[in-house]
Amino acid sequence: MKKILLIDDDRNILTTLKIHLEDTGMKILLAESGQKGLELFNQEKPEVVFLDLKLPDTDGLQVLGEIVRSEIKAYVVIITAYATIDTAVQAIKMGAFDYLPKPFTPEQITHHMQMMAKVHLLESEVETLKNQLKGIIREGDFITRNRNARSVLKMARKVADTDASVLISGESGTGKGVLAGLIHTWSPRSSGPFVSVDCTALQENLLESNLFGHVKGAFTGAVQNKKGKLELAKGGTVFLDEVSEMSGAVQGKLLHFLQHKKFERLGDTQMIRVDARIIAATNRDLEELVQENMFRQDLFFRLNVIELFLPPLRERPEDIPLIAEHYLTQFATVNNKHMKGISDQVLKSFRSYPWPGNVRELINVIERGTILSQKDRLTMEDLPPHIIHYKPRTPSTQKMQTIAEAEKSHIKEVLLHTASIEEAARVLGIDPATLWRKRKKYQID
């Protein structure tokens, strides 16, 4: 729990509550009217609300009703005088957590906060047990009931306690970065930094500087010494996203670091020793790149101490509704929308669509739909055209296709309905560099 909202027109009450709640470490929000309180409630989405029944502009029970009917989960404590205990009981029947009689003591405030914390913990444990009974695993934004994905999470937990290098493979958008973050969170290094490096985003010398740092004068524009991501990750974890895109020179320097835990800044001769774990990810077949002399074999072996493969979303159809509902809730909250769910027609469409951009593409579709939707459910009219008009290919309607042929066909379709490479990449849930490579591979103009 992170936020507390106090709604009372008595400034002395607000001051007293604020003083006694400041030690909780939660953000404290103040409102002297029911309307202001509801505005703050919808904007800030606090987990705890202290609400006076007597307000200058409205009845406290009306405010409570609005809070209870909203999609935002909150524990509401009614502030009441002894003369209105009956009304407080009515408030509890409506959904309030408890009531706090005036005048109250610091011990009573502490007691209510402790009770709400215990209930919150129990509710979380019950939700976890329900998910386990359904075979669902929820670890932050990683949600799955798929057997293979669950096995990957189980292995990730085992290796998290070690310092072994981990190589996460899988198509773009499958959640490799999310999994890397979970490994860091579960590891003894969790109190240290988690630093991500996108190896596709920078040219060779810039990537080398970004990763290892540089000294003043190392290249044009290097006007001062700069620490690289490895130094900044001291005691923590470095996540190398799309490590296959590293040049040979940077690969060699990374190999030296993995062997000796030390490196030189760009333009320097002094060795720097750093304790940092490496987790790498790739959407390409590194063994194949080794055979083609495009990736160092010795570095591949150093990175591939533990390999984790994330299956594509099309092989996890049972996860699609779970992920969609999870992000619908998130985006509805961010955009102040009251969304109750996703229509059956949309879910059916989602199951038949191949999701070449995987989870990232699904997230983009849900975010777009949530923003555009004018209803309390996500419907077909909220989806992008390439999903609305997608027709599953079957042997009876079309010749059998390889995965590569299907991917080429879908990329051409998305490019046809988008205005730029960047927009097409967002729709597909991949980065523009990956889309550029695929266009070149499939000779798509």
Image: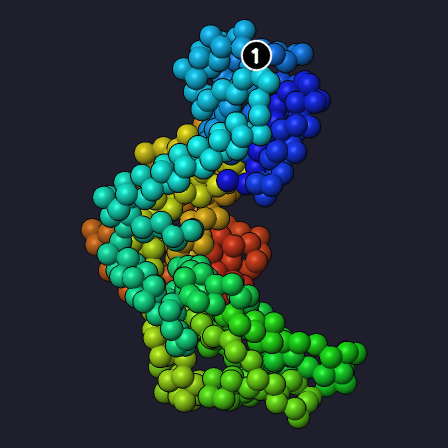
Q: Quadrant of residue 344?
A: top left
Residue visible at 24% across and 56% down in the picture:
147
Q: Secondary structure at mark 1?
A: strand
Image height of 272 relative to 144, above or below: below
Name the spot of residue 116 as percent of width and height, x first. Answer: 45, 33
Residue visible at 54% across and 17% down in the picture:
101
Report whether 197 appears left or right of 313.
right
Residue visible at 40% across and 34% down in the picture:
119
Q: Residue furthest left?
A: 396
Q: Which residue is mark 1?
A: 81
Does the image show residue 338?
no
Report whether 336 appears left or right of 176.
right
Residue visible at 36% across and 38% down in the picture:
122
Report whether 250 appears left or right of 215.
left
Does the image show residue 273?
yes
Amino acid type at mark 1: Ala
Name the spot of residue 108 as percent of width and height, x first. Answer: 52, 27
Residue 118 versus residue 326: which sits nearer the camera? 118
